[in-house]
Image (tube, grey):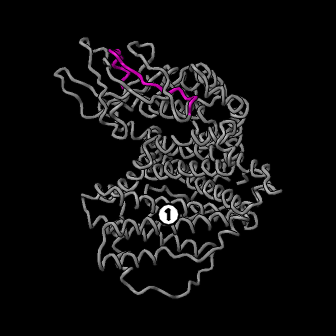
Amino acid sequence: MAVAEDKKTSIKGGEFLIKETPASQIFIPEEFNEEQQMIADTCRDFLRTEVWPRLNEIDQAKSPELMSSLMDKAGELGLMGTVVPEEYGGFGMNFNTSMLVAEATGAGNSFSVALSAHTGIGTLPIVYYGNESQKAQYLPKLASGEWKAAYCLTEPDSGSDANSGKTKAKLSEDGKHYIINGQKMWITNGGFADVFIVFAKVVDAGGQTDKNLSAFIIEKTFGGITMNEPEHKMGIKGSDTRQIFFNDCAVPVENMLSEQGNGFKIAVNILNIGRIKLAAAALGGSKQVARQVINYANERKQFGTSISNFGAIKHKLAEMAVRMFTTESAAYRVGQNIDDLIITLKEKGLSDADAKLKALEELAIECAIMKVHGSEVLDYVVDEGVQVYGGMGYSADAPMDRAYRDSRINRIFEGTNEINRLLVFDMLLKRAMKGQLDLMGPAMAVGKEIMSIPDFGFDEDETLFAAEKKVIRNLKKAVLMVAGAAVQKFMTKLSDEQEIIMNLADMVIETYVAESVLLRVEKRIDLLGAEANTLQKDIARIYLNEAVEKVNIAGKSAITSFAESDELRVMLMGLKRFTKIEPLNLKDARRRIADALIAKNDYIF
């Protein structure tokens, strides 16, 4: 078995567009050690014994006691303190291990939402931004599950534009408390939370309101807190979601989190964590649905045979596997990049909390990419799951009903997928403008390349995936070509062209995940040998073919939105050149994958 010798380097956000990453430098899920796998198995066992048998009961619960009691049991197993530092009663897991936990618990439907709201957005603001006194006071109880947490950011008129919130915090006359007044909505765990992370704008003695949010740790016992009955939702019905009202809620001044006016930064950085963790959770949900669908396809007989023997069904099963395996490849690539950058930053003298925040901020582009991709893969899997089940898929007595409804929220959680697409390109462009990422230099080079005579020579490189790596390089050129032309065309007004920006984001997303799955399979072959990766090679090549088509479509949509005459013809010619790939018999490749799934009656990757 070959061992990678390349020294790992810390990857900065967005660099994948202009640099090639050696397969030896990425992390793949096959590298999780025995202890990490045992942690994941504990999470899955908890779902199997405590959650799945009670899914109907959870959805139909009229009060929050059942969910709260499940959270208590999760706390007894340590599932509530996975990311809390050991000195405060948690396990202090590294980022990629916490990603594995998010995946393993992601198949718990409403319970998964409640758990992630507590361990993520409810607890992490204190982990990363709390002072020593706040950490000592709150983290041990949050880690054990004795106290549950909720996160209060969204308001009736403040959703994607989080900094427009109207909740106010005014210092009391004696200077000992902030008096909080305002309304929050869509608050997960609201009905049973003991601690709320609340965002508000400070009003000074002269009545002047801060432009930016501040964050506060508020205990339920502080008083002045009321709430509506649980919301009636399309899905995740067992998740306790409420409107919370703060009416002259007196909060000790020492419970301000971080500094005054730093709330928006806290919210943004915590959302970065939530986005990549959501991708992992969506992956866990996808795998569970896929297993159910494979089982049903084998059991259901029509025309004298199992429907799993039909090509149309095999296509669906294989495509589920292709997309899930690809999401998994990219998600853990990002997770390890975050861990590696944390280590590098700590070696440079940053504190543990500051290093983690800086690393997450640096990899925010990739976090947004994975949030979009993971949530849309889950939606694909559940939608096709309904289709494979046929009429039974539409029945509330079959598992696809809940899976279909529960999955839909993930494209809205942690910033809608539209917002995240806009953020992907906006962050890339801002880093380029600050000189942190050289995009325009490579873009200009690509512009010159499309004006030159194409190289029709044969590639002599016969190394593993040489042809596929060339395709990836060309996809990156396609992104740079379209992005560079759009920037030059619109300059500062590009932000008004959201359709074009979303086209560019789709090009970036597909390029990143296609590269990720290729790198994973390359590393798997290095570790396990070619014979153990026949199906994985099929997966990588299928996805690369699909990515090329998607990049071509998105690129053409963008180009025709702003280019005309000779520029239009030249750019379309360049796009055609950069989105070429050798034909692959996709049907046979998918059938090989599907047949393996069907034979094992399980999701096997």
Residue 214: give x, y in percent of width and height: 32, 30
Asked if the stretch drawn in magenta spans residue 87, the answer is: no
Asked where in the image residue 469 lies, by quadrant, the reply is bottom right
Q: How busy is the neighbourhood of tag 1: few (under 14 within 10 Å), some, or many (20 plus)? A: many
Residue 169: give x, y in percent of width and height: 29, 22
- What secondary structure characterizes most of the magenta part? strand
Along the line of sight, the residue nearer the viewer: 305 or 422: 305
Residue 90: give x, y in percent of width and height: 58, 29
Q: Is residue 539 above or below residue 298?
A: below
Asked if the stretch drawn in magenta spans residue 240, the answer is: yes
Regarding residue 521, the answer to whether it shows in the image is yes
The residue lying furthest to the right in this view is 304
| Residue shown at 44% from the left, 24% from the top | 196
| Residue shown at 52% from the left, 52% from the top | 373
Q: Which residues are magenta?
A: 236-256
Question: To which residue does mark 1 refer?
Answer: 511
Regarding residue 1, the answer to whether it shows in the image is no
For the C terminus, the quadrant is bottom right
- 82 lies left or right of 44: left
Along the line of sight, the residue nearer the viewer: 2 or 312: 312
Residue 117: give x, y in percent of width and height: 52, 32
- The disc labelled 1 sits on which kind of residue? Thr
Along the line of sight, the residue nearer the viewer: 261 or 116: 116
For the N terminus, the quadrant is bottom right
The residue lying furthest to the left in this view is 206
